[in-house]
Image: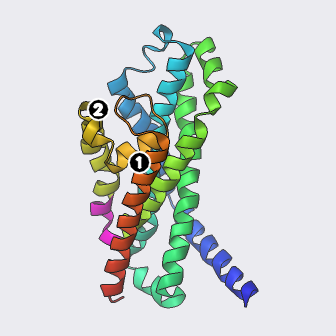
Amino acid sequence: MMGHSNANWAGGLRAELLRYFSGYSILGVIAFSALVPWFVANFLGWPDNADELSATENIQAFWALATTIAIVATFAGSYLVTRESYYGTLRRSVVMSGLIHLVAVKYATALVVGLATLAAGIAAWGASVAFTLAPEVRADLISPDSWRALPGVVLASAVGSLWGCSLGWIIQHYYATTIATMLIPLAVELPILANDPDIGRWLPSGALAGIASLPFEGLLPPGPALLVSLAWLLAASAGAVAVLTRKEF
């Protein structure tokens, strides 16, 4: 029984990953994982001012921008649901796998693709920004002190990917979910975080920024920020359960 269950899980996860990485859409996700940090970098003035900053400040700026890849990870988590909704295959997947099994597998896959998105984004963003930095700044960014920021960024992307999967189940519409996972965080939440951190730190993006210990005033410390993120995730998961229990596939 246990072996059969494990085989079902492995097969479901493999099928979801194959579906996600098939086609050209994955290239768009990788491109966004590099473009989003550059978009936010325009507001911070980095790396143009890298030569004027200390090693610590450059490290903080790099990882602050890398944390914005969590927004793309959120979209990636939602895409596992909205892609099937868009192509009309979600009902068939529910019938073949069972709703509970399918939901659980998609959440697990969302975590995997979220972390893969982060890895690809850091590689693409880091490679693109390296050409604009002085050799000594590049050396600072790959020093052991720099990599200490990585766990917080990984955790933020992991939570973001699960949050995105929940939004995908709630909305089940590709374009509307894309707005919720990418446009609203960039166009609404980040400006609020920059101008009114007392409010912004309680928003989903502000909580993820706090998890990663970004060098911005007004953010919650990592522990409380994680609790706020988990509260958002729990609320979204409850919303997903409410939608799925009422929906007829």
Mark 1 residue type: Ile
Instruction: Name the residue furthest top.
Output: 52
Please state which of the two labelled residues, at mark 1 or mark 2, is closer to the viewer: 2
Q: Quadrant of residue 41?
A: top left
Q: Quadrant of residue 3?
A: bottom right
- Residue 55 is situated, as x and y percent measured from the top left of the image, at 56, 15
Residue 212 magenta-highlighted: no
Q: From where the camera sits, is residue 127 visible?
A: yes
In the image: residue 75, left or right of residue 186: right
Whether residue 145 is situated above or below residue 25 in the rendered picture: above
**Residue 194: numbered disc:** 2
Residue at the spot x=58%, y=30% of the render?
127
Q: Quadrant of residue 46?
A: top left
What secondary structure is found at the residue carrying circle 2? helix
For marks 1 and 2, the one nearer the N-term is 1
Towards the viewer: 205 or 114:
205
Q: From where the camera sits, is residue 89 visible?
A: no
Residue 176 magenta-highlighted: yes
| Pointer 1 local density, CA inside 10 Å: few below 14, some 14–19, many at least 20 | many
Residue at the spot x=37%, y=72% of the render?
238
- Residue 164 is situated, as x and y percent measured from the top left of the image, at 41, 60
Mark 2 residue type: Ala
**Residue 71: numbered disc:** 1
Q: What distance separates the C-alpha of mark 1 from that of mark 2? A: 16 Å
What secondary structure is found at the residue carrying circle 1? helix
Whether residue 68 is situated above or below residue 235 in the rendered picture: above
